[in-house]
Amino acid sequence: MNIQPLDDRVLVEQVEEEEKVGSIIIPESAKEKPRMAKVIAVGTDEDLQEHVKTGDTIIYSKYSGDELKIDDKEYLIVQRGDILAIVK
């Protein structure tokens, strides 16, 4: 299935963050919602397409985006204003 976000939206796949800090293992109940994601598709906004590219890793706002599940994979659609940074 091919999904093309509209306007200033970006389709991302969440990146699993490290479960271990130093020698301390963080239990599932203490983990925060992931905030890093890999860009799968960029919306139709031309200015957004100049800054965010497919394959980039982004950091987004904590409780942003709309979740969806396609072919047993979980994705998130976030708006441009929810993208905080691009990881280089």
Image (cartoon, helix red, strand yellow):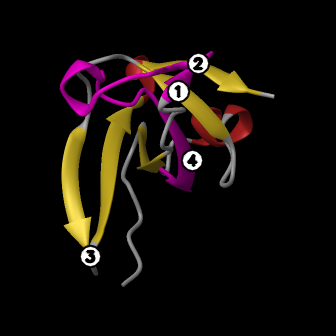
On the image, which quarter does residue 46 sit in? top right
Which of the two discs, 3 and 4, labels the residue nearer the N terminus?
4
Judge whether 64 appears above or below 8 on screen.
Answer: above
| For the residues bearing labels 1 and 3, Cβ distance under 8 angstroms | no
Name the disc covering residue 23, or none.
2
Of residues 19 and 53, the one drawn nearer to the viewer in this rendering: 19
Mark 3 or 4: the one toward you: 3
| For the residues bearing labels 2 and 1, Cβ distance under 8 angstroms | yes
Residue 50 drawn at (x, y percent): 72, 37
Disc 4 residue type (three-letter): Lys
Label 1 secondary element: strand
What distance separates the C-alpha of mark 2 from that of mark 1?
7 Å
Q: Can you identify the residue that label 1 sits on? A: 20
Range of the magenta residues? 20-43
Label 3 secondary element: loop
Disc 2 residue type (three-letter): Ser
What distance separates the C-alpha of mark 1 from that of mark 3?
26 Å
Label 4 environment density (alpha carbons within 10 Å; few <14, some 14–19, many ≥20): many
Label 2 secondary element: loop
Q: Can you identify the residue that label 4 sits on? A: 38
- For image coordinates 62% across by 15% down, the residue present is 22
Location of the N terminus (image quadrant): bottom left
Label 1 environment density (alpha carbons within 10 Å; few <14, some 14–19, many ≥20): few
- For image coordinates 47% across by 32% down, the residue present is 19
Label 3 environment density (alpha carbons within 10 Å; few <14, some 14–19, many ≥20): few
Q: Can you identify the residue that label 3 sits on? A: 72
Which of the two discs, 3 and 2, labels the residue nearer the N terminus?
2
- For image coordinates 63% across by 32% down, the residue present is 47
